[in-house]
Image (spheres, helix red, strand yellow):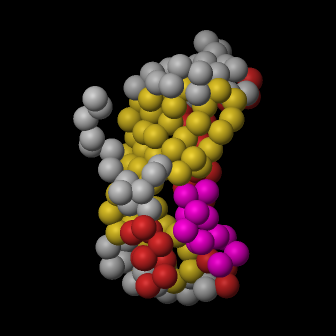
Amino acid sequence: MADWVETFKGAILSSEYDPEAHMNSQTYVSRFDQATWFLLSSIGVTPEKMREAEQRVAIVRQGFQYLRELKGGDLVEIKSGFVAVGKKYIRFHHRMFNTVSGELVASSDCTGVLADLSSGKSVKLPAAFKKAAEAHLVTFNVAKD
């Protein structure tokens, strides 16, 4: 199994939290979306390459789990990895941590496909894409010592 990829690092800004200084849900979603592009980039899939291939990455399923609150000024990082690779799909997982405490605060589980821009239909993953994603497979159901 591969190591998790660091896909985001940042701080919770004043524009990203509610009146009680808790990070708002819109920001969690935005951070996970940014992490997705850094994870894809780690295997050579970039927005430029998607435009050249006249394709897009379409997230067809996404789930969230919120475990702890983040507050204004907290430092956050996301680590990501692929958990399954099929003929036409990828499934990946993001884990968001409070950088200072090391606590897992949220996670996102996603399934994505490549879609042809002209037809809008999903297409088979190119061999290089599939191979690169398979080389980055991680596990997140491992018990801690």
Q: Quadrant of the C terminus?
A: top left
Q: Position of residue 58 (x, y in %)?
A: 49, 67
Does 44 lie within the magenta span? Answer: yes
Residue at the spot 53% in from the left edge and 51% down from the top edge = 5
Of residues 141 and 15, the one nearer the viewer is 141
In the rendered image, residue 30 lying in the magenta stretch gets the answer no
Single out the residue that lies furthest toward the top: 20
Quadrant that contains the N terminus = bottom left
Up-down relation of residue 37 to residue 57 (above or below): above
Location of residue 113 with respect to 123 vertically, above or below? above
Residue 73 figure quarter: top right
The percent coordinates of residue 125 (x first, y second) are: 43, 81
Relative side of 80 to 42, left or right: left
**Horizontal side, residue 140 vs residue 131: left or right:** left
On the image, which quarter does residue 124 sit in?
bottom left
Q: Work out whether residue 93 or residue 139 is closer to the camera in this orientation and state it.
A: 139
Q: Residue 132: give x, y in percent of width and height.
A: 47, 72
Query: Residue shown at 55%/41% (left/top)?
Result: 78
Q: Residue at x 73, y 27 (%)?
A: 13
Q: State whether residue 70 appears in this view.
A: no
Question: Considering only vertical position in the picture, is 119 above or below 7?
Answer: below
Q: Is residue 85 visible?
A: yes
Looking at the image, which residue is at 49% across and 82% down? 128
Residue stretch in magenta = 38-49
Based on the displayed image, in which of its 4 quarters is residue 100 positioned? top right
The outermost residue toward the right is 14
Find residue 97 and report its horizontal and vertical position in percent: 51, 31
Foreground residue among 103 and 56:
103
Prevailing secondary structure of the magenta residues:
helix
